[in-house]
Amino acid sequence: MKVVRDGTTVRNIPITAGAASTPTWNGRMVISEKLISTRMNGATVGYAGQYDIPDVPHAMRLSTSGTFIHGNYWRDDSVFGRSNISHGCVGLNDIKGGGDLGQDAAWFYDNSLIGDVVVVKNSDDKVIAPDNGLNGWNMPWSEWTAGSAR
């Protein structure tokens, strides 16, 4: 993942994204919530029994349907930048509890704001719907203005 600020790349972070069977949405997604730690349970997004992780660190919501960028301590370090194995989230290397500020997830969390735009491309999934979170960025301008009050 390339982190860009004011047109300049400030950091490249190895990630793991959605597996072939559960790909990550493509498109522009807006960080709408930041949680230093949260519970992620597959049952809340239609993956009953597949996972229940009570302490996911550095979680940043990208969609109302459950897509996040978050710290991941339960996968081996070797998957980041090499394998897409998640249920659709974007995972960044982290430690349990998220207390090591040198980890990629902590750095990204500390350097991101609610309202920042995250662009996902080259995923096998379609572009996220404009109404799935704050993701109107994916709507063509002609459609956007057609729905306005003018």
Image (tube, helix red, strand yellow):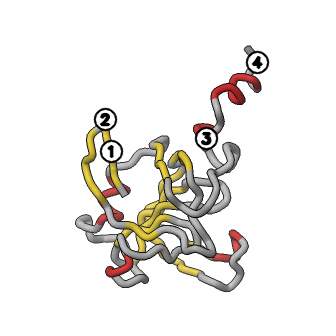
| Above-or-below relation of 115 to 25 | above
Q: Position of residue 43 (x, y in %)?
A: 70, 76
Q: Which residue is mark 1?
A: 4
List the residue tagged with mark 2.
Answer: 6
Check whether the beta carbons of the residues at disc 4 and disc 1 lie within 8 A of each other.
Answer: no
Rounded to the nearest whole Å, what is the CA distance between mark 4 and mark 1? Answer: 34 Å
Give SS at disc 4: loop
Q: Residue 84 location, x and y as percent?
A: 47, 73
Q: Residue 131 versus residue 36: which sits nearer the camera?
A: 131
Q: Image check: 34 left or right of 8?
A: right
Q: Residue at x 64, y 33 (%)?
A: 140
> Which residue: 60% across, 82% down?
51
> Which residue type does callout 2 highlight?
Asp
Residue density around tag 1, few if under 14, some if 14–19, many if 20 or more, within 10 Å: few
Few, some or many C-alpha atoms within 10 Å of disc 2 (few <14, some 14-19, many ≥20)? Answer: few
Q: Secondary structure at mark 2?
A: loop
Secondary structure found at label 1: strand
* Label drawn at residue 149: 4
- Quadrant (top left/top right/bottom left/bottom right) for the C terminus: top right
Asked if the residue at tag 3 contacts the one at tag 2, i.e. Cβ–Cβ closer than 8 Å, the answer is no
CA–CA distance in space, label 2 to label 1: 7 Å
Q: Earlier in the sequence, mark 2 or mark 3?
A: 2
User: Which residue type does callout 3 highlight?
Assistant: Asn
- C-beta proximity under 8 Å, tags 2 and 1: yes
Residue 138's quadrant in the figure? Answer: top right
- Residue on which disc 3 sits: 138
